[in-house]
Amino acid sequence: MITEQPTFKALADPTRREILRQLADSDMTIAQVSNNFDMTRAAVKKHLTVLSDGGLITVRTRGRERVNALNPEGFAPVRDWLVFFEQFWDDRLTDLKSAIEKNQPND
Amino acid sequence: MITEQPTFKALADPTRREILRQLADSDMTIAQVSNNFDMTRAAVKKHLTVLSDGGLITVRTRGRERVNALNPEGFAPVRDWLVFFEQFWDDRLTDLKSAIEKNQPND
DNA sequence: TTGACGTGATACCAAATGGTTTCATATATA
DNA sequence: TATATATGAAACCATTTGGTATCACGTCAA
């Protein structure tokens, strides 16, 4: 079973969400990502590990480099979670609509 | 400007996400929510405060009670965030498709 | 082969987080 | 009015988190 916890946890930090946005533009090595943030490479590496644990990115080896890329499938837990509530509100609206129509049959 | 940070932060904790799911069934007072978790009312109250700060729930006073309810609008930051990436992938697919058609004009 | 480069991993630290207990305050009720 | 109920808030604590510095290791290039 897929647990959604690592995914939501990974998204809780603004630096990590910014990393995802940048990876949307292009895959990047750890060093490249680090250049875009005012923190050490070690700190960025930790964030990338959390993102990887959350399934939001994949990492492939290229020589001595490690290339990070978005993993579209990793976003599924968030999508599913959101759909649960949106579906719920859709049903609520449908119920409300039918209730109104029931009380106002003269449309 | 709406900052998405409090929203994502609120969603990082499994207890808080479970509270949201329960509130989808019915609005609840703090005491009612507390009854569903194995922790003190004070702890639950803290979680509700975080959810409120994140705009995910609204709280109304009813006598000496405080009734917590889902706030559909509070989910917008997550929806917007997700749409950014899904749109991105849609564009990628479109680009890929047109590139393929360009190289295979004999369809 | 010998550095230089890119990364992994660990120890360490301050601050944030998630929980507790305790007490104060406001409202409902006998 | 006196008491019980529902909540608010603060002090406190252990653990997690997000950062640092440092060193070890594999790979590329002269």
Image (cartoon, coloured by chain):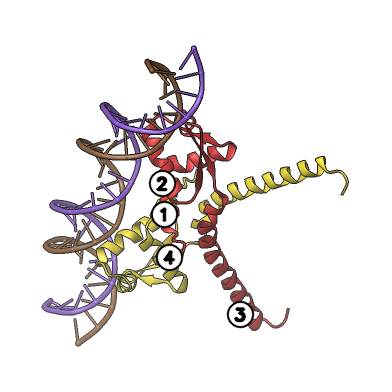
Chain colours: A red, B yellow, C brown, D purple
Q: Determine the CA span between mark 4 and mark 2.
A: 24 Å
Pick the front one: A106 or A37: A37
Callout 4: SS: helix
Q: Which residue is mark 2?
A: A50
Pick the front one: A69 or B74: A69
Pick the front one: A30 or A23: A30
Pick the front one: D29 or A76: D29
| Residue A36 visible in the displayed image | no
Q: Earlier in the sequence, mark 2 or mark 1?
A: 1
Q: Which residue is mark 4?
A: B20
Whole-percent x, y for residue B34 in the image: 30, 70
Amino acid at circle 3: Ala
Labels 2 & 1 near each other (Cβ < 8 A): yes
| Residue B53 visible in the displayed image | yes
Q: Nearer the viewer, mark 2 or mark 3?
A: 2
What chain letter is assigned to the residue under label 3? Answer: A
Q: For the image shown, how many numbered marks are present on the structure?
A: 4
Q: In the drawing, what numbered circle is on residue A99?
A: 3
